[in-house]
C-alpha cells in the first residue's frame, strides 16, 4: 500500500513540475510589449531644395517644415521658401497612440539610434546641393538630440518616409496648392478733383 502511495505522490510531483516548466516557457515566448515613445520625444524635420533642383510635386520632396513637440502638437507646412528657422502654424495635436506609432516607424527605419546621427549644428547654415535636395531630421529623446541628414534622398529613403508620415498626420496636401492671383477691380471715378490745386 505504501508503495502505491509513493508512486502516486511521485507522479503528482512530476506533473506539477512539468506544468510549471510549460508555464515558464509560455511566459518567455510571449512577445515584448509595444514600443512606446519617450515622454520627451520631439521631432524637427526640414526639407530643403537647391536653387537649380527640379520642382517636385510629392509632398515629402517639396520644401517643408514639420515640428512635433512632446505634448503631441504638430506644426506642418510645405511651401517654397520655408526654412529650418521657421515655425509653421499648428496643424493639430496628435494622440499618444499616434506619437507612439511615429516613434515605432522611425525605430524600425533605424533613425532613433543617436549613434547613427550627428550633433545638431546651426541648421540655418546648411545648404542643400545646388541641383538636389536635403532632408534634415532632428530627434530629441531621453535627454539627447541628434541630427539625421540625407542629401538627395530617394523616394523610399528612411527620412522621406518619416516626412511623408508627418505630412499625412499634419493634413498637408499631397500636391502643391494652386497659386491664385486676384486682379483687383479698379473703378473709374473720373478726373482728379484735386488736380486744380496742384502747381
Image: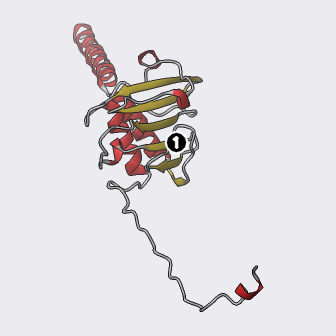
Residue 72, given in percent of the width and then of the height, sits at 54, 45
Q: Is residue 65 above or below residue 91?
A: above
Among the 4 quarters of the image, the one containing residue 130: top left
Instruction: Report the quarter where the N terminus lies.
Output: top left
Please tell me which residue lies in front, 103 or 32: 103
Residue in view at x 26 percent, y 33 percent = 154
Q: Residue at (24%, 14%) from the top-left corner?
A: 11
Query: Is 88 placed left or right of 5 in the picture?
Result: right
**In this figure, which colouring scheme has been used for the structure?**
secondary structure
* Residue at the extreme front: 199
In the image, residue 17 sits, relative to residue 168, either above or below, namely above
- In the rendered image, the quadrant that contains the C terminus is bottom right
Q: Position of residue 77 (x, y in %)?
A: 47, 50
Residue under the image location 33 percent in, 54 percent down: 174
Callout 1: 10 Å neighbours few (<14), some, many (20+)? many
Report how many numbered discs are placed on residues in the image: 1
Q: Residue at x 27, y 11 (%)?
A: 10
* 187 or 50: nearer the viewer: 187
Looking at the image, which is closer to me, 171 or 51? 51
Residue 34 appears in view: no
Q: Is residue 19 above or below residue 66?
A: above
The correct choice, above or below, for 146 with respect to 193 in the image is above
Q: In the image, is 23 to the left or to the right of 195?
A: left
Quarter of the image for residue 102 reads: top left
Nearer to us in this view, 116 or 94: 116
Which SS class for mark 1?
strand
Residue hosting label 1: 67
Give residue 167's position: percent from left, percent from top.
Answer: 40, 48
Question: Farthest top residue?
Answer: 3
Q: Is residue 182 visible?
A: yes
Amino acid at each position: 500500500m505504501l508503495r502505491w502511495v509513493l508512486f502516486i505522490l511521485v507522479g503528482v510531483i512530476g506533473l506539477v513540475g512539468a506544468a510549471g516548466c510549460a508555464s515558464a516557457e509560455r511566459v518567455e515566448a510571449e512577445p515584448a510589449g509595444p514600443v512606446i515613445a519617450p515622454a520627451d520625444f520631439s521631432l524637427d524635420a526640414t526639407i530643403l531644395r537647391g536653387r537649380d533642383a527640379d520642382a517636385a510635386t510629392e509632398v515629402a520632396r517639396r520644401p517643408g517644415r514639420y515640428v512635433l513637440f512632446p505634448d503631441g502638437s504638430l506644426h506642418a507646412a510645405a511651401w517654397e521658401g520655408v526654412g529650418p528657422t521657421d515655425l509653421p502654424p499648428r496643424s493639430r495635436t496628435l494622440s499618444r497612440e499616434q506619437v507612439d506609432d511615429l516613434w515605432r516607424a522611425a525605430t524600425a527605419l533605424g533613425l532613433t539610434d543617436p549613434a547613427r546621427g550627428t550633433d545638431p549644428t546651426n541648421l540655418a547654415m546648411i545648404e542643400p546641393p545646388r541641383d538636389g535636395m536635403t532632408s534634415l531630421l532632428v530627434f530629441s529623446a531621453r535627454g539627447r538630440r541628434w541630427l539625421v541628414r540625407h542629401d538627395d534622398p530617394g523616394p523610399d529613403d528612411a527620412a522621406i518616409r518619416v516626412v511623408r508620415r508627418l505630412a499625412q498626420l499634419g493634413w498637408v496636401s499631397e500636391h502643391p496648392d494652386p497659386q491664385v492671383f486676384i486682379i483687383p477691380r479698379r473703378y473709374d471715378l473720373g478726373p482728379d478733383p484735386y488736380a486744380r490745386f496742384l502747381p
